[in-house]
Amino acid sequence: MYKKLKIFSTEDREILKKIGELADKNRVDIYAVGGYVRDQVMGNKSKEIDFVVVGDSIRFSEMVKEKLRGRGFVVYPKFGTASFVVGDRRLEFVTARKESYREDSRKPDVVPSTLKEDLLRRDFTINTLAVNINRNRFGEVIDFFNGISDIKKGIIRTVLDPEETFSDDPLRIMRAARFASQLQFDIDPETLEAMKKSKDRLRIVSQERITDEILKILSHSKPSIGLRVLQQTSVLEVVFPELAAMSGVEQKDEYHHKDVFEHTLKVVDNVANVTDNPMLIFTALVHDIGKPRVKRFVEGAGWTFHGHEVVGARMLKRICSRLRLPKEYFIYSEKLTRLHMRPINLIGEEVTDSAIRRLIVQAGDEIDDLLKLCRADITSGNPKRVKNHLKNFERVARRIEEVEEKDRMRQFQSPVRGDEIMRICGIGPGPLVGKIKKMIEEAILDGDIPNEYDAAHKYLLKIKDDILNDLIDH
């Protein structure tokens, strides 16, 4: 047992007290449990509150919904769970239960049980805390498995034998890595070793659930913690082999090449610190995915990765499909992976407006995100080198901003439409229309004419006769 817990949010206290009063009236024992109590102990906010009801949770949750005027009522009778929303909080109720698993499935057989047995079935000790919300015991914390001690130590540890825990529900392997990133906790050595031994059990888990946990790892402020756990336990070889292939520093003669996986972890953390865009953070994870396939040693120069951005972009269609990611993830990550070397390669060059225009047009609406990725991609163990590279990169970024502002290139397309080209040139639909349109666009990108309708129209009138004469000659 633990001293009574102070619920930090006034709104939460009011909700819990109303539910507790209803429970007393109906002679029901009820507890807030799991992640909500963990977050309260740690002083963190939570938008979801899970409850264990010793009794019929579905019947009781229906009464709570009426009392609190909840919305979006969802019921899973087989598992004795129900949930709904009150304000901006999601409340979920479950009947105290125990579970048993079959070897070929992570879906348990469920029977009603006691609070202790319900908490015993949970994944990690930090998630086994319960707080009573009945009036006479309101705020009293139940801590059967030393969860508070593990929270104070910053340790993730399974409640039962870790190999049994991960064998029963192998998705808990991914959840351990996710909690490590979310809470920035260490994983207990015995639990860590069991993750490694049980990794192949993840093959019975649906790809959607695995991908969801990967994206949750990426959603926290330091994704590198969870990703490194997956790499150290060899779980990455099962769930994301292309990432696993990036690990390892090789030496040939006096030359070392930087560990691509460790570099990627730095880039992912850098991006996660400046955005909460999940597609950009995912792109940071995969932007160098092609490096292992193009790695070459050049005598006198050392290791090279020429064309890795092109190879990586090609790999992403298969990767995104396997991960069951939405199509927009592929479109976005393929574009930024393919382009991520372009701004960096402009550093140290006399950058022409034409080169800048072409980059802006190719990046389109993602130009700002591309620059965020490129800044994050400048990593080194030498802070002075990073500072110098960033300083040089900012010059390129300013040039991009100047050209974009001057030429309005982001939403670029030929100012003269295809139907107008056909009318002026007296031609019908076909490849020639696209060719003429491309010539106008190239003239704008090269700076021969401004990105304006009048200039493009005048240019079309100037070139159309030569184009048509060439067509007749051929």
Image: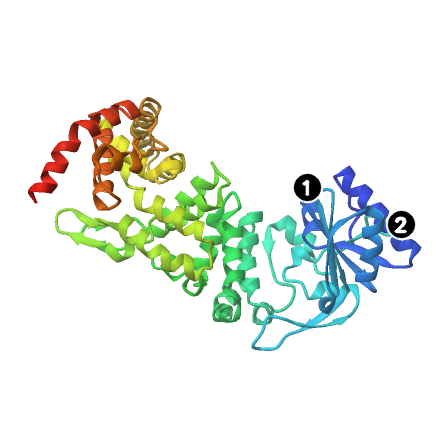
> How far across and down, in percent of the image, does residue 117 sit?
75, 67
Which residue occupies the foreground of this view, 229 or 400? 400
Give the number of marks: 2
Q: Quadrant of the C terminus?
A: top left
Instruction: Kindly identify the amino acid type of the residue bearing the numbered disc 1.
Output: Gly
Up the image or down, 262 lies above or below 392; here it is below
Q: Of all residues shown, which one is farthest toward the left?
A: 473
Q: Is residue 137 left or right of residue 458?
A: right
Which residue occupies the foreground of this view, 423 or 351? 423
Up the image or down, 87 lies above or below 242; here it is above
> How far across and down, in percent of the image, does residue 7 sit?
77, 42
Circle 2 residues within 10 Å: few <14, some 14–19, many ≥20: some
Disc 2 is placed on an element classified as: helix
Instruction: Kindly identify the amino acid type of the residue bearing the numbered disc 2.
Output: Glu
Q: Which residue is mark 2?
A: 21
> How far across and down, in percent of the image, does residue 398 sit?
33, 25
Up the image or down, 152 lies above or below 79; here it is above
The residue at the point 33 percent across, 49 percent down is: 288
The residue at the point 29 percent across, 26 percent down is: 451
